[in-house]
Image (cartoon, grey):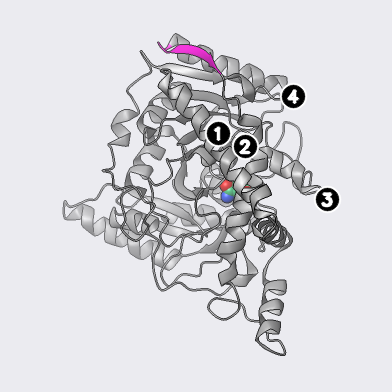
Amino acid sequence: TQAHLDAMAKARALNAYLLETPDRALAMADASDQKIASGAGRPLEGIPLGIKDLFCTQGVTTTAGSKILQNFEPHYESAVSANLWRDGAVMLGKLNLDEFAMGSSNETSAFGNVVSPWRRKGSDAALVPGGSSGGSAAAVAARLCLGATATDTGGSIRQPAAFTGTVGIKPTYGRCSRWGTVAFASSLDQAGPIARTVRDCAILLGSMAGSDARDTTCADLAVPDFEAAVSRGVKGLTIGIPKEYRVDGMPAEIQKLWDEGAAWLKAAGATIKEISLPHTSYALPAYYIVAPAEASSNLARYDGVRYGLRVPGKDIAGMYENTRAAGFGREVKRRIMIGTYVLSAGYYDAYYVRAQKIRTLIKRDFETAYANGVDAILTPATPSAAFGIGEKASADPVEMYLNDVFTVTVNMAGLPGIAVPAGLDGQGLPLGLQLIGRPFDEETLFAVAQVIE
Ligand code: GLN
C-alpha cells in the first residue's frame, strides 16, 4: 500500500486520482496485516485498489466527475465497493472519469482530463486513456493500484482497457449490484474490474459480484469460481467471428490482430466459425437514444435541493436552473437535451420505442448465434488505438461516439464482454480484442481471454 501511495504521489501529472485517501489506505492495510498475522486472511487481504469516483464511498467525497457533486459525501457505501472491503481490499483513492460516465476519452471530466501513461513511438504527445473509466485504466497501466473498479454503460470498461493494455470485463447485466453506484443509464450500467491480467480480473469480479435485494435488477445467482475458470482452455469451444464487425475504415492493423486472435484460439483447440449479427449497425444509433433517455431521467434528481451544488435564484425554479446550468458540463447537457427530446410526447414512439425494438432485435441476433452452438464471439475492442488529447473532442460529438461501435452492442443485449490486450500497433500502442459471451457465462470469457493474453 505504501509503495502504491508513493507511486501515486509521483504520478499526479496523469490526473488519474481525483482524491487520494492515504490515511484510510494505511489503516486498512494495518488491519489486513493483523488479519494475516492472526491466520484469518480474507480473499483480497491487503490488495490496494482504486475506486472509480462513480461508486459511493461512505464519508469519502464522491463526485461522478461532475461539479454538481463536487462536495457530495455519501453516508452509504456502494454494494460493489462494500464487497471488496468485506474481502479485505484496501482503498487507495477515487479515480477520475468522464462526467457522469459520459464519454470515451476522459475529456468530459469537470476536474480535467486523465493522461494515459502510454506514448506513441518517438513522440511526447499526450494520449487519452479512453473513457469513461479512464482514471481506472490509466491507474492500472501506470501501476498506481493493483486493480480498479469501473463501470460500463456502452464500453466504458472495455474501451479504456483496450487503450491502455489492461484487461477489463463488463459482466452480464445483473451480475453486480448497481446499488450505491451513481446512475447513468440504469438498463445498461454494469460494474466490473480493470486489472493487469485476466486472472486478476477474475479474482476481483468474484468479490464485486453477487445478489443484492437493494437492486431489483441484480441477479439472484451464486457467484461462480471465476478464478478456476481462467485455466480451463478453449478445447471444444466454438468461437464466432461476426462479419458485420468488419466496418469500413477499420485500420488494417486491427483486422490483422483480429485474424491473429482467431488463429491463436484455433491453435489452442477452438473451432472458428463465421457468424452474422445482422442488426449490428443499428446498435450505436439506438444506444445514443436509450442511454440519453435514461440519463435525462436519472439526472433529474440533481436539482440543488438534495445533493451537492446549489446556486441561488430568484425563486425555486430559478435555483434549479442556475444550479443545473452551473453544475453540468456540455456533454451532460447535450445528453439531457437529447434524452428529454426522445422521451417527449410526439417523439416517444418515433425514437424511444423504436430504439427499444431495435434493442430486442440486437439481443435476438446474439441469441441465435448462441443457439447455433457459438460459445463466445471474438471482435476487435475498438476501431482504433488511443488517440491524442484534444484530437476528437472536436465540434462533432458523433466522431467520439463512433469509438463505441464494437462495445455498445454488448450493453444493449445485456451480455458479458471482456477486453484483453492482444498486441501493439505500428506506433507501439496497445490494441485489444473483445470477447462476448452468453448471459452469465463470464467463465468462458475468462478461459478464452487467458489464451489470447
Ligand atoms: N462512451 C459511451 C458514452 O459516452 C459509453 C460510456 C459508458 O460506458 N459509461 O455514453
Check mark 2 vs ligand 1: CB closer than 8 Å? yes or no.
no
Q: Which residue is mark 3?
A: 395
Q: Which residue is mark 2?
A: 283
Residue 112 in the image: x percent, y percent?
A: 68, 59
Q: Which residue is mark 1?
A: 362
How far is the residue under mark 4 from the one under mark 3?
22 Å
Q: Earlier in the sequence, mark 4 or mark 3?
A: 4
Q: Magenta region: which residues? A: 268-275
Amino acid type, label 4: Asp
Q: Earlier in the sequence, mark 1 or mark 4?
A: 4
In front: label 1 or label 4: 1
Residue 282 in the image: x percent, y percent?
A: 65, 35
Amino acid type, label 2: Ala
> Which residue is at 59% across, 53% downward?
11
Judge whether 388 appears above or below 212 on screen: above
Mark 4: few/some/many CA within 10 Å (<14, 14-19, 20+): few
- Residue at disc 2, secondary structure: helix
Q: Which residue is mark 4?
A: 248
Check mark 3 vs ligand 1: CB closer than 8 Å? yes or no.
no
How far is the residue under mark 1 from the one under mark 2?
7 Å
Judge whether 437 appears above or below 218 on screen: above
> Which residue is at 42% across, 16% downward?
238
Amino acid type, label 1: Ile
Residue 166 in the image: x percent, y percent?
A: 52, 37
Residue 191 in the image: x percent, y percent?
A: 45, 49
In front: label 3 or label 1: 1
How far is the residue under mark 1 from the one under mark 4?
20 Å
How far is the residue under mark 3 from the one under mark 1?
30 Å
Q: Is residue 80 something one can see in this rendering?
A: yes
Residue 342 is left or right of residue 177, and the answer is right
Residue 134 is left or right of residue 123, and the answer is left
